[in-house]
Amino acid sequence: MKSKSLLSAAICAGMLIGTLSGCSSSSDSGSEPIRLAVYPLTSPYFEYAIEELGLFEEYGANVELVEFAQYTDVIQALDSGNVDASIMGITEAVAPICNDIGLEIVYMTDYSAGMDGIVASKDISSLEELSGKTVAVNIGTMNHMLLLSALESVGLTEDDVNIVNMSEGDAAAALVGGSIDAASIFDPQLTNAARESGGSIIFTSEQLKGELSDVLLVNESITSERADEVEGIIRSWIAVQEKYAADPESVISCISDSTDLTEEEFLELMAGLDIASADYNKEMFANGGEKMAELVSRVSDFLYDTECIDSVPSAESITAAIDTAFVDAIE
């Protein structure tokens, strides 16, 4: 999903460097604001609309948006305490759990529903035809996980294809140039590569509902000491989601004012993305977060198998990192 892949690649490489700068904050509640990291290509940019519409204040959360130049910088900031929370890809949420840096998953915000996929050259029309072919993917990312799931669905494994490690942009260019046979990437590169190469998209994340997801991670000191405000952040997210459904132009306008996205670009982004509803979260966080824990466990196994993490977190560690109290509080 968009730039989520950058951080997973950085996890594998161990390169997490960056600089942050404050954006803006909500009304002063007498305490330091909760610092919420935002970054280019964050999906679906609702944080900016929440800020501009005053929803953080309305729901009692004192929040400062902290902008990053790159998504790869966020974990270092979370690890060092320079920020308190961030919306991150589920693959990236595993690293803090492994490292036990005191971050909790409190809500699922969205999931890919067609934004990510496998695009193949014009002489390939099915997943089965990838056998023996060269497929580019950014190793250790959600698109890598998508590729393995797609291959498995037709009885293939990564050993049946020649996987080459490439960034999404390089993979798209390589497909168009004819040096590879297929690529597992995300939009807009996915759609553009299919159009420019004359090929087709043979598999998308729409067939893996909820697997390639984003979650809200919050430092456990904040969830324990400022629980009302964390609940306020989640309620403000639900509120902007409802506002987008009722009056999308007002939300898109706020996001365009705060980013370089045009309305057309934002709508293209949303076409491949589903916002996780409160009811969907109720399902994921039910029974002590059973389904969320299963998802984190599957992602952990994937990252271990691709040598992006040194060990798989225990079931106890995963359960401890999923805070169900906030979803439980939603009426």
Image (cartoon, helix red, strand yellow):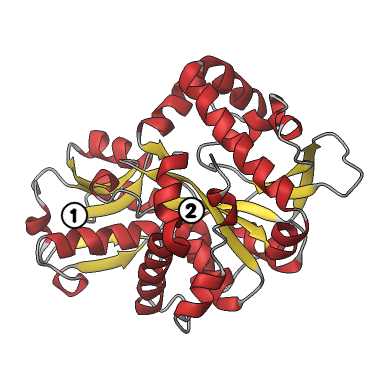
Residue 181's tag is: 1
Comparing 92 with 245, the one in front is 245
Which picture quadrant has residue 139?
bottom left
Mark 1: secondary structure? loop
Q: Position of residue 201 (x, y in %)?
A: 20, 42
| Callout 1 amino acid | Asp
Toward the right, the furthest residue is 30
Which picture quadrant has residue 77?
bottom right
**N-terminal label among 2 and 1:** 2
Residue 252's tag is: none
Write the residue at 60% across / 24% down: 256
Q: Which residue is mark 2?
A: 4
Toward the bottom, the furthest residue is 311
Mark 2 is surrounded, within 10 Å at the Cα level, by few (under 14), some (14 to 19) or many (20 or more) other residues, namely many
Q: Can the viewer see residue 275 in this picture?
A: yes
Q: Position of residue 168 (x, y in %)?
A: 39, 51
Comparing 78 with 18, the one in front is 78
| Callout 2 amino acid | Lys
Write the residue at 46% across / 27% down: 265
Direction from residue 199 to residue 45 in the image, left or right: right
Write the residue at 80% across / 37% down: 25
Q: Comparing marks 2 and 1, which lies closer to the viewer?
A: 2
Comparing 277 with 185, the one in front is 277
Identify whether 309 is placed above or below 329. below
Direction from residue 36 to residue 206 in the image, left or right: left
Write the residue at 7% across / 57% down: 129
Mark 1 is surrounded, within 10 Å at the Cα level, by few (under 14), some (14 to 19) or many (20 or more) other residues, namely many
Direction from residue 93 to residue 47 in the image, left or right: right
Q: Can the viewer see residue 313 in this picture?
A: no
Direction from residue 26 to residue 234 in the image, left or right: left
Real-space Cα separation, disc 2 to disc 1, in angstroms: 24 Å
